[in-house]
Image (cartoon, helix red, strand yellow):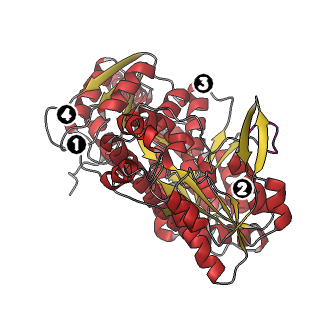
Amino acid sequence: MAGRHTVFLGMAAGVGKTYRMLREGHGERGEGRDVVIGYLEPHGRVETEAQADGLERIAPRIVNYRDVELTEMDLPAVLDRRPELALVDELAHTNAPGLEHEKRYEDVADVLAAGIDVYSTVNVQHLESLNDQVTELTGVRVRETFPDSVLSDADELVLVDLTPSALIERLRAGKVYPAARVPAALNGFFRIEHLEALREVALRQVAEDVEAKRLRVDMLPAREDRLMDTAAPQAVGERLLALVTPQPSSQRIVRRAWRSAQRLGAEMDVLIVLGREPSAAEREQIEAFHRLGSLLGARVIVEEGDDVVDVAARVARERRSTYVLIGTPAARGAVRRLTGPSLVDRLLRALPGVDLRIVADRSRREWPRS
Amino acid sequence: MIAAPIILAAGVAVGVVVALVVVRRRRAADLAPRGTRRILFPYVGTQLSVSALDAALRIARAENATLVPAYLAPVPMAVPLDTPIPRACDRAFEMEEAIEQRAAGANVPVDGRIGRGRTVRHALRGLLADEHYDRIVVAAATGRTDGLSVADVAWLLEHAPGEVVVLRPADEAALAAA
């Protein structure tokens, strides 16, 4: 079983991520867990070094690259040691060439895969998708980035927060960088307006993570239903099938079907039946339906067939649909009315026991909306 | 004497045929796709400026184009980008329906879209890659209505191929969702 990953996220260097991670590590050790420091980047911070005391530390590897000695996490040593929990600093770090992986988050993935829990630290500006935004906010392009999926796959995200003015105070007091680097830092990255913007980004990031995890929990029963559905001989719940054509006007059918599906707690499929080779505009519309389906979590099925009713009836049976929604059928001429049943009649006959709903075009309503 | 009823019957028959042809032609005209030009109208939020939408509809009508309103939906960072986002779709659908109703009044065809991304710009980038369009019309944010930020408009002007029309609505009325 893979280990659990907890990420300590901050707006910038010096907010206390590493310190907090080490403190939590002490707490876990106090609870009787086997905790080691897999890699620590103390940046010469006295408080951080002091907090690391009392925790076993796996010696880093010294790698010589272009006559420069670089210290890196010793991944094989961490894996050999097999602790219950490893503390790994600087998740976005780029490893020296020649090591197992290019990036430290890839090392962490190996540690997690070995069943070891990991606490790690990272600043929000390293997040890949925020790179442009952070560059615009701060004027500084961050080169060491990591994919969003690392954060989304993490089991827990802990925000380590500090007000911008408090961080600047820490910087001035020499608690973040050595004294010689402080003036440059204050004039560069550590401006109050930059820190305020980054803090907002970090706070929003964690808020979104909380919402996303709640959404995932909300979606879990639906996933379980899907799994059960494959084994169950009969559909247990409701399932909607929206029968559409590759035309913009069909979007209202999908919207209406989606709302009904939401109310019923049902899943939804969208069926497009093609009687001939689709035109370029129709192909574009089909692509748009696929993208919409992916946003909704609905399956978009494209079938070829000369008879829409036959195809719809087959798909409805296969998908165990309990509702079929269609748009308002085009008016039929007197001759066609006399010579054969309507689409609605044929669908009703082909799908006994399935509700059929005709979706009207509300923009054609003749009375004002209330 | 016999000829009169025959002439009358023939006249009625011709009248019916003419009426049928006229009705059919009108129906065909109603159903025919109007214009292949497409005006992309990306928007954010749920407080869309009515005057901005009306301006976009006027442009679409003048060019005999289809309006493609595209709701830009944010995807939380902590979930994969292709995760379903039902709540955002709910909001988008409400907006789409309100836009469609207003567009129907202006006799402009609509082909709605939802673009998604981590940020507005990310969603815009995807939308520009996926959709074909002849012109982009966007509303800038005002104090009381949602719209693209100055930075997003600047990004669009720099990166979007083709003509971009930026509307800065003067009024403060927002379109109510259906």
Whether label 3 touches label 2, CB < 8 Å: no
**Residue A100 spot, x, y in % from top left:** 82, 45
Tell me where the magenta segment starts and ends, as one range.
A96-101
Q: Which residue is mark 2?
A: A108
In this rendering, position of residue A281 left or right of residue B158: right
CA gap between label 3 and label 4 equals 33 Å
Amino acid found under the numbered disc labelled 3: Ala
Q: Which mark is residue B145?
A: 1
Q: Split into 4 quadrants, where in the image is the N terminus of chain A?
A: bottom right
Q: Which residue is mark 4?
A: B51
Other residues around mark 4 within 10 Å, as few (<14) / some (14–19) / many (≥20): some
Q: Are marks 3 and 2 on the same chain?
A: yes
Hey, which quadrant is residue B148 in on the image? top left
The answer to whether residue A333 is seen in the rendering is: yes
Query: Quick one: label 3 or label 2, which is nearer the N terminus?
Result: 2
Label 4 secondary element = helix
Disc 2 is attached to a residue of which chain? A
CA gap between label 3 and label 1 equals 36 Å
Amino acid found under the numbered disc labelled 4: Ser
Q: Which residue is mark 3?
A: A280
CA gap between label 4 and label 1 equals 10 Å
Hey, which quadrant is residue B87 in on the image? bottom left
Instruction: Indicate which label's residue lies in the foreground, 4 or 1.
Output: 1
Image: A191 above or below A90: above
Other residues around mark 3 within 10 Å, as few (<14) / some (14–19) / many (≥20): few
For this rendering, which residue is in front, B92 or A274? B92
